[in-house]
Structures are given as structure tokens and as C-alpha cells.
Image (tube, rainbow, N blue to C red):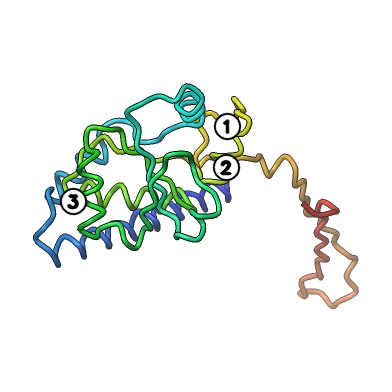
């Protein structure tokens, strides 16, 4: 329950952060192609995640019509990236030359990926606000997980992976129990006896 609640809190915080970014951009420039309500409508329309099963199919069959945008810093892109991907670092996303490039490929399905899935979602929101096609997807997870489980060796268990999905049942592996032992009190009447708390947890590390 705690892990689920933490994920929900993180999701809400990420959404609030993105909403603030959009609000700032919407009110400090008049070059956006969609209103706030139109962006919200575009965000809620349809499924926006590209699964690793789809990625594996696209890459192995060299399917046309997809444009992969790598939002990581240039040095990370230079080290390794998806074949055919274009590098547009997130902090340069709204540069006019990059917007022109993306508009040139507006008929393609644009797939965004980054060091974290949340960055890719933020980029999608900004591009939608900029007026680009709604045909923009986010690759689940990050580049490392996508490469490992969608390209190098496709694993069906990772087919629809995304960062907010719980990967492990921690309660199953971390069997923590709390035992209480109440000692006989020799204190005078009216004094609450002491309670010894002993916490027993799983031994070893991850």
C-alpha cells in the first residue's frame, strides 16, 4: 500500500510540475498552436505509450513511418542510441530549428524517449502545446530498459512496461514482522508498564 501511495504522490507531483511548465510557457509566449484546453484534450485522447513489443516489431521489421527523438544530452546520444534516432536534447526542444525539423516529419509517428519516461511525457506535452501533430508517442521506461528488453532481447513480460508500473511485489520479498513483548512491571500501581518493541526484518541486501 505504501509503495502504491508513493507512486501516486510521485505521479501527482510530476503532473503538477509539467502543468507549471506548460502554464509558464503558455503565458509568456504567443507562439503556441493550441490553447490550454486543447492541450488537455489532446493529452487525454487515446493511448500515448509505445510498448516494447511494438518497439521490437518496428526495429526488427524496419517499419517505416516512425521518427524516434532522443531527448538525452548529446554526450549520452553519442555513446549509444536507437538506430535512425534524431538527437534533440530536452532543454533545446523548443528551439525554432528543432520545431521546424519536427514539423517536417509531422506525417510520421513521432516517438520520444529520454533518460526517464517523465521527461519524454513533458516533451510530448510541450510539443502538443506548440501545435504539432497529436500523433506523438512516448517510449515506456528509458533508453536502457528499452534497449535491453525491446531490442537486444525482447521479453514478453516487459511488453507493456512503463515507469509507474510496479516491477516487484516488495511485500512478498521483504517479510517484516513486528513483535511486542510486555515485561512484568514492578512499578507502583497506576504506572503504565514498559513495552519492548523488537523489529525483525529480512536479512541480507539486494
Q: Are dots 1 and 3 in contact, CB under 8 Å?
A: no
| Mark 3 Cα-neighbour bin, 10 Å: few <14, some 14–19, many ≥20 | many
**Which label sits on residue 158?**
1
| Mark 1 Cα-neighbour bin, 10 Å: few <14, some 14–19, many ≥20 | some
Could you tell me which secondary element the residue under label 1 belongs to?
helix
Measure the alpha-carbon separation of dots 1 and 3.
32 Å
Of callouts 1 and 3, the N-terminal one: 3
Could you tell me which secondary element the residue under label 2 belongs to?
helix
Of callouts 3 and 2, the N-terminal one: 3
Residue 109: give x, y in percent of width and height.
Answer: 30, 33
Q: Nearer the viewer, residue 62 or 131?
A: 62
Give the left or right position of residue 47, taking residue 79 as reference. Answer: left
According to the image, label 2 marks what residue? 145
According to the image, label 3 marks what residue? 130
Could you tell me which secondary element the residue under label 3 belongs to?
loop
Tell us which disc is closer to us: 1 or 3.
3
| Quarter-of-image position of residue 65 | top left
Q: Nearer the viewer, residue 98 or 188?
A: 98
Q: Nearer the viewer, residue 28 or 88?
A: 88
Residue 28: give x, y in percent of width and height.
Answer: 14, 67
Residue sitting at x 36%, y 58%: 90
| Mark 2 Cα-neighbour bin, 10 Å: few <14, some 14–19, many ≥20 | some
Of callouts 2 and 1, the N-terminal one: 2
- Residue 75's place in the image compared with 117, above or below, is below
Residue 107: give x, y in percent of width and height.
Answer: 22, 32
Q: Are dots 2 and 1 in contact, CB under 8 Å?
A: yes
Residue 135: give x, y in percent of width and height.
Answer: 26, 34
- Residue 45's place in the image compared with 86, above or below, is above
Amino acid at each position: 500500500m505504501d509503495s502504491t501511495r508513493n507512486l501516486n504522490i510521485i505521479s501527482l507531483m510530476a503532473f503538477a510540475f509539467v502543468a507549471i511548465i506548460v502554464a509558464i510557457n503558455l503565458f509568456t509566449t504567443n507562439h503556441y498552436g493550441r490553447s490550454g484546453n486543447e492541450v488537455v484534450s489532446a493529452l487525454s485522447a487515446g493511448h500515448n505509450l509505445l510498448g516494447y513489443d511494438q518497439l521490437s516489431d518496428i526495429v526488427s521489421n524496419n517499419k517505416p513511418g516512425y521518427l524516434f527523438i532522443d531527448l538525452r544530452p548529446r554526450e549520452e546520444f553519442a555513446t549509444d542510441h536507437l538506430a535512425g534516432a534524431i538527437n534533440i536534447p530536452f532543454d533545446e526542444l523548443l528551439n525554432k530549428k528543432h520545431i521546424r525539423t519536427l514539423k517536417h516529419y509531422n506525417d510520421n509517428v513521432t516517438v520520444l524517449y529520454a533518460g526517464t519516461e517523465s521527461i519524454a511525457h513533458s516533451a510530448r506535452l510541450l510539443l502538443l502545446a506548440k501545435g504539432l501533430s497529436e500523433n506523438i508517442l512516448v517510449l515506456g521506461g528509458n533508453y536502457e530498459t528499452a534497449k535491453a528488453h525491446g531490442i537486444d532481447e525482447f521479453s514478453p513480460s516487459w511488453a507493456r512496461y512503463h515507469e509507474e508500473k510496479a516491477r516487484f511485489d516488495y511485500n512478498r520479498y521483504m517479510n517484516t514482522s513486528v513483535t511486542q513483548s510486555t515485561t512484568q512491571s514492578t512499578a507502583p500501581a497506576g504506572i503504565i508498564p514498559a513495552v519492548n518493541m523488537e523489529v525483525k526484518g529480512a536479512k541480507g541486501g539486494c
